[in-house]
Amino acid sequence: MRRPAVLMLLVLFSSTGYAKWSESRLGAGLKIGEPLAVSLNYFLNANTAVNVDLGFGWEDENAAAYKMKNLTFLLVADVKYYHAFFDVGSGDLPFYAGLGVRAFFKYEHVGIRVPLGAAYFFEKAPVSVFAEWAPAYVFIFKAVVNSAAVGFRYYF
């Protein structure tokens, strides 16, 4: 158990940057999955970003109950730490981990989430694509709820 914690600390506090076009700090795009949302990402520095997703998610922790009628308004806010593990030639492919909150507005469900993912930053265009998995502990359910999504962002 101790080895994964040490590895996570090394990843989170590494000094490797996120993208070659670092003058672009604010990204806006679409996240498809859970949640289905407009996604904003703002880099505070080369390794740390604040992410806010505003959209729709499922209110029920039971996967069998995931129907369109159960969609409700959702806000997700995270702080993410980026680290590039290996060279991909063109562009950057950092992995990230973070900590954040998720809130459903219909029934005031609130939870803590841990997003884990990877983002590919294109070298010649201010665009990134990403895939993310984020387990969350939802207090009202007293259960862990998993969410996953893919998406893209354009950086201004």
Image (spheres, rainbow, N blue to C red):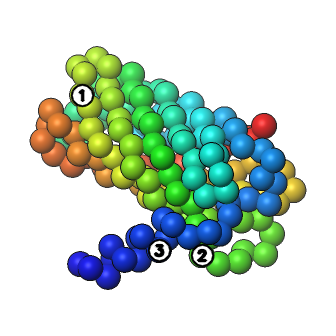
Specify the farthest residue to the bottom. 3
**Residue 44 vertical position relative to residue 65 in the rendered view, above or below:** below
Q: Amino acid at mark 1?
A: His
User: How far, Cα to Cα, is label 3 from label 1?
Assistant: 33 Å
Residue 119 at x, y percent in the picture: 61, 57
Q: In what element is the residue under mark 2?
A: loop
Q: In the drawing, what numbered circle is on residue 109?
A: 1
User: How far, Cα to Cα, is label 3 from label 2?
Assistant: 11 Å
Dot 2: few (<14), some (14–19), or many (≥20) neighbours within 10 Å? few
Which is more N-terminal, label 2 or label 3?
3
| Camera-nearest label, 3 or 1 | 3
Q: Amino acid at mark 3?
A: Leu
Which is more N-terminal, label 2 or label 1?
2
Dot 3: few (<14), some (14–19), or many (≥20) neighbours within 10 Å? few
Q: For the N terminus, which image quadrant?
A: bottom left
Residue 98 at x, y percent in the picture: 44, 53
Q: Residue at x 57, y 60 (%)?
A: 82
Q: As rendered, which of 125 and 48 lies closer to the eye?
A: 48
56 displayed left or right of 131: left
Q: Residue at x 29, y 47 (%)?
A: 136
Q: Amino acid at mark 2?
A: Phe
Q: Which residue is mark 3?
A: 10
Q: Which residue is mark 2?
A: 85
**Residue 143 vertical position relative to residue 88 in the rendered view, above or below:** above
